[in-house]
Amino acid sequence: MTDRNAANTRSRILEIAGELFRTKGYAGTSIADITGRLGTSKAALYYHFPSKEHILDAILGDSLAAHARIAELADGNATAEELLGALVDLVAGAGTVLAVFGNDPSVVAALSQRESDYRLRDKDSRIVAALAGPRPTTAARIRAQAAIAVAKDGTRMILAGRDRGLRKAERAELLAAALRAHHGQGGTR
Amino acid sequence: MTDRNAANTRSRILEIAGELFRTKGYAGTSIADITGRLGTSKAALYYHFPSKEHILDAILGDSLAAHARIAELADGNATAEELLGALVDLVAGAGTVLAVFGNDPSVVAALSQRESDYRLRDKDSRIVAALAGPRPTTAARIRAQAAIAVAKDGTRMILAGRDRGLRKAERAELLAAALRAHHGQGGTR
DNA sequence: GTCTATATAAAGATAGAC
DNA sequence: GTCTATCTTTATATAGAC
């Protein structure tokens, strides 16, 4: 039983690579690291993926698309509550991989080196702009960043090292905290 | 003029390495990358540091010490305001390097691989515990994480790509946002 | 304190057999 | 679809001259 149908080898690679990228970083993980856990040779892996970067792409694909959708939402007329709720859902859902990997500088460098408009920082700043409003005061910008920090990093921290996703009550609590951070006594938007 | 007194070569290495670690990641940065900017040979760098890991240590030294002090503060009887304010000051001050590098999985892996009690996650959880209180409800834990997210990641985001530190008013705004995130309508602690 | 040259290991990736 | 073997490049690090 040296193999298990093997059509799923590809998905096993993605699973193992994702785990290793998360714990050792993208640049810090070698192909040999992956195949070591996979139990195959390196050549076998290269049958499924043409390069290490293609593995990263396959892992990040859905997340990047979801991230882009949020940025578009920010460009529209969404309220702060809609936007922050969408951010929480992003991190708790399709974007959770990116929320984690987006902190890895070697991932960011790999993405931004390519012509593709994977401009993470750029998309993030559109969200800030939507929350802070046009020509924001310093205080408004800080409150916007604070709210985003709750929605993104707060959610990520809550989910860290867990199997299941966010429960409804947890989502509500996170969103409420983000909204409190966003509205000063004076309130914005 | 092939050299400039050269007693400061060491500090130039730290400066350049810090910049590169930040943008390409620790694992993603090679000694050749560093000496490429430094304008010397690789051997010259190894005169100043015995290994790449020693460079990382030199960069992180102060930050790690500051981080440890915060964890001790959390174990004491500090109020939420004192603790969150200390966190903001940490990220804005001595700990800013760690706040940035602590997101790099290859840095975390390098640190935690060593016996030394650089247990970052562990120290972080002591801060959460201090803010959430003993036997916290789910909601209390989430509010604590949210407040920490503001103090750490919010502050980091505000400082990203900037020279100067936090102004007094900015610090106050961040702390206020963190406290709002922490206190539900009901309040804690 | 910096150099050239090199040792040694590990990286990403491929060739060709099965 | 996976293997062994290997190529090529790059990595960390050292030796020894100046």
Image (cartoon, coloured by chain):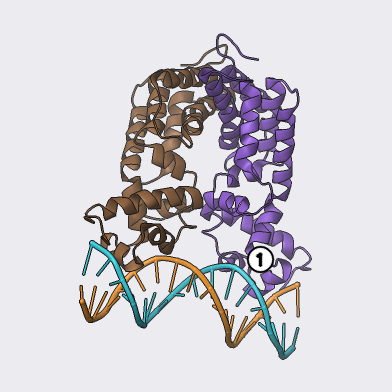
Chain colours: A purple, B brown, C cyan, D orange
Q: As rendered, which of B144 and A123 lies closer to the eye?
A: A123
Label 1, secondary structure: give it. loop
Residue B10: x %, y % from top left: 28, 54
Task: Find residue B93 and report its image quarter.
Answer: top left
Instruction: Tell me where residue A10 sits by quadrant.
Output: bottom right
Place of residue B52 in the rendered image (x, y in percent of width and height, measured from the top left)? 37, 60
Q: Which residue is mark 1?
A: A51
Evaluate whether residue A132 shows in this view. Answer: yes
- Residue at 64% x, 60% y is A53
Q: Locate residue A113, reporting x and y percent.
A: 60, 54
For this orientation, the residue located farthest to the front is B1
Q: Residue at x 66, y 26 (%)?
A: A84
The picture places residue A15, in percent across and down from the top left corner, at: 67, 56
> The N terminus of chain A is located in which quarter?
bottom right
In this rendering, the answer to whether B129 lies above or below A11 is above
Q: Is any part of residue A41 visible from this angle?
A: no
Q: Pick out the residue farthest to the top.
A: A186
